Image: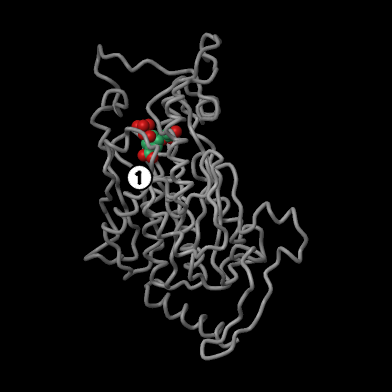
């Protein structure tokens, strides 16, 4: 299960090709469009989301709503393209027409500066168009296909926001399903009404000041089998793969699994999750807590996966930060363009997608098969082996 994405934020479309979806898996536009809609939501989003209604169009790999086993191509068209045909013209402009003036005042915290140096661009638009979080629409589309695969094995992926701008959500040890359901109804994807109101006010205040806010979201996965990933090589560890995947999302600066950095503060007796055995008709090994967040030794351990990511505030500030004109070397305010005040709720949906992608990859790796039936047979046989131990 691998994929590539392509597309500029204000170009004609975003495109992705996925390979490795087993033949026979039900794949239709509706569940993908639902995820795209979730990504577009959240209090604190900018005007772009009013222009777009992201929907997916399949160009290959699906017939009568079932995956063919061939590469799946999906396209999400940018409605805003209609307003950018000259500024983002693919062909050279006709004789006599002026190219849009280059922008060369990088935003602190953005890809602008490093991207201009790296690719030798004079215009930071050539960097921002691809570095833009607009591309997360394709990531969410791929994640939606991954979720369809995971759902075949009873694996569910959800998320909620636990902190925006330092306002933290209270409530440890609440039921994960309940949290997911509550956050779905919240404009900031928060499962705590008190915090929700404070966060909405904080976003309004940040907007008024021309500032932006970051935060932390938590992705929770239920129904994972034990043994995805491996301890044998550094690049096969599930936690490492998940961290890389979450860090690949624009503006993410940190990832924690389970108790995360908290493990540094207390002794081992308060960190590690004790085992016990529950007999009866559905006899199985159980754990007294889940501080490990569902991974031990680079493998899933059969408990819910709990992983958090911290997002920095978006670097496009309407109250511009000090910067330098890269041509004149003069100190001037940074470039500012329409943007979001806070995109943490949207990032939490993107986080779900990235996690789903990694898990789909690991499920494909462990259970193989070219069709969904073959994959299921291998999964069932493994499940039986584990249940009999
Ligand atoms: C985004 C689309 C972008 C931004 C945002 C995310 O659209 P536009 O630039 O036309 O307003 O709103 O991206 C960023 C803030 C960024 O820095 O990347 C989207 O569809 O998610």
- Tell me the quarter of the image containing the N terminus: bottom left
Q: Of residues 285 and 227, which is closer to you in this image?
A: 285
Provide residue 278's location: percent of width, then percent of height. Answer: 60, 84
Left/right placement of residue 127 relative to residue 15 reads right
Quarter of image, res 45? top left
Q: Is residue 130 something one can see in this rendering? A: no
Q: Residue furthest right?
A: 267
Q: Is mark 1 within 8 Å of ligand 1?
A: no
Q: Residue furthest front?
A: 194
Label 1, residues with CA under 10 Å away: few <14, some 14-19, many ≥20? some
Please report the residue visible at 64 percent of the width from the left and 63 percent of the height from the top.
Answer: 291
Left or right? Give the position of 162 relative to 27: right
Residue nearer the viewer, 150 or 365: 150
Please tell me whether mark 1 sits on a helix, a strand or a loop.
Answer: loop
Q: Quadrant of ligand 1?
A: top left
Give the residue pinned by disc 1: 41
The spot of residue 19 in percent (x, y) is 40, 58
Position of residue 39 measured from the top left corner of the image (x, y, whole percent): 37, 47
The quarter of the picture where the C terminus appears is bottom right
Q: Whole-percent x and y of residue 110?
A: 51, 30
For the residue pair 235 and 70, the one nearer the viewer reads as 235
Does residue 174 sit above or below 325 in this rendering?
below
Number of labelled discs?
Answer: 1
């Amino acid at each position: 299960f691998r994929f590539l994405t392509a597309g500029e934020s204000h170009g004609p479309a975003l495109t992705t090709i996925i390979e490795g979806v087993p033949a026979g898996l039900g794949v239709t536009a509706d569940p993908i469009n639902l995820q795209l809609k979730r990504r577009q939501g959240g209090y604190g989003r900018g005007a772009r989301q009013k222009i777009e209604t992201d929907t997916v169009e399949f160009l290959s790999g699906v017939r009568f709503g079932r995956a063919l086993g061939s590469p799946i191509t999906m396209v999400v068209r940018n409605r805003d393209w209609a307003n950018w045909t000259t500024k983002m013209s693919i062909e050279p402009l006709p004789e006599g027409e002026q190219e849009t003036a280059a922008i060369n005042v990088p935003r602190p915290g953005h890809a602008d500066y490093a991207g201009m140096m790296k690719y030798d661009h004079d215009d930071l638009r050539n960097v921002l168009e691809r570095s833009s979080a607009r591309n997360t629409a394709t990531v969410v589309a791929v994640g939606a296909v991954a979720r369809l695969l995971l759902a075949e094995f009873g694996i569910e992926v959800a998320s909620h926001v636990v902190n925006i701008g330092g306002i933290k959500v209270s409530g440890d040890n609440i039921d994960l399903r309940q949290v997911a359901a509550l956050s779905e109804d919240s404009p900031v994807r928060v499962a705590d009404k008190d915090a929700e109101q404070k966060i909405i006010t904080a976003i309004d205040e940040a907007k008024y000041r021309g500032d932006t806010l970051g935060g932390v979201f938590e992705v929770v996965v239920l129904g994972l089998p034990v043994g995805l990933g491996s301890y044998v090589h550094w690049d096969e560890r599930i936690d490492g793969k998940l961290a890389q995947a979450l860090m690949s999302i624009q503006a993410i600066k940190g990832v924690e699994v389970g108790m995360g950095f908290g493990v540094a503060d207390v002794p081992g007796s308060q960190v590690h999750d004790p085992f016990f055995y529950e007999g009866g008709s559905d006899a199985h090994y159980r754990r007294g807590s889940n501080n490990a967040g569902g991974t031990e030794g680079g493998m899933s351990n059969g408990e819910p996966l709990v992983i958090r990511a911290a997002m920095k505030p978006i670097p496009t500030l309407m109250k511009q930060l000090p910067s330098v004109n890269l041509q004149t070397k003069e100190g001037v305010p940074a470039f500012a363009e329409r943007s979001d005040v806070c995109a943490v709720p949207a990032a939490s949906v993107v986080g779900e997608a990235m996690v789903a992608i990694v898990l789909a990859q690991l499920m494909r790796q462990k259970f193989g098969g070219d069709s969904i039936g073959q994959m299921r047979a291998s999964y069932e046989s493994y499940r039986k082996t584990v249940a009999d131990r």
